[in-house]
Amino acid sequence: MLRVWVDWTVSVTSRVRGRERDAGAGFVEYAGLMILIAGIFTLIDQLGLDGTISGAIGDAVDDVVGG
């Protein structure tokens, strides 16, 4: 049992701290980020907040440029 524990610990350590520690993580992270962004855009559209947000941004720009 001790040998199995040592083998597992060494393999996990090499996977976490070794050369290939982030292999494949980039795609998963980007896919998750894209799903999150799409969900936010869908939520904004479904709640009808797009006009409100656009108006608030326009008002803020007008305040900055003095128009």
Image (spheres, rainbow, N blue to C red):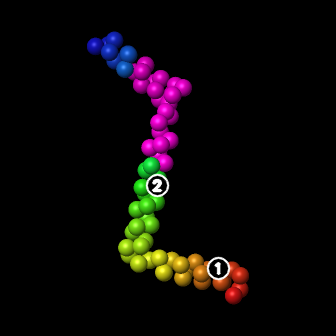
17 in relation to 58, above or below = above
Image-based side of 42 in relation to 23, left or right: left
Q: Secondary structure at mark 2?
A: helix
Image coordinates of residue 2 in percent, x first then y, are 32, 13
Give how far apart the Cα atoms at labels 1 and 2 are. 28 Å
Amino acid type at circle 1 is Val
Q: Residue at 42% x, 55% y: name it.
A: 35
Instruction: Check residue 12 for magenta coloring.
Output: yes
Q: Secondary structure at mark 1?
A: helix
Q: Residue at 37% x, 20% y: name it.
A: 8
Q: Residue at 48% x, 81% y: name it.
A: 51
9 in relation to 53, above or below = above
Per the picture, the main secondary structure of the magenta-coloured stretch is helix
Residue where numbered disc 2 is placed: 34
Residue where numbered disc 1 is placed: 61
> Could you tell me if the residues under marks 1 and 2 are in contact, i.e. CB atoms within 8 Å?
no
Instruction: Check residue 11 for magenta coloring.
Output: yes
Front residue (pair 51, 66): 51
Q: Residue at 46% x, 60% y: name it.
A: 37
Where is the C terminus found, in terms of image quarters?
A: bottom right
Dot 1: few (<14), some (14–19), or many (≥20) neighbours within 10 Å? few
Question: First in sequence: mark 1 or mark 2?
Answer: 2
Image-based side of 31 in relation to 1, left or right: right
In the rendered image, the residue lying farthest to the right is 65
Amino acid type at circle 2 is Met
In the rendered image, the residue lying farthest to the left is 1
What's the magenta region? 9-30
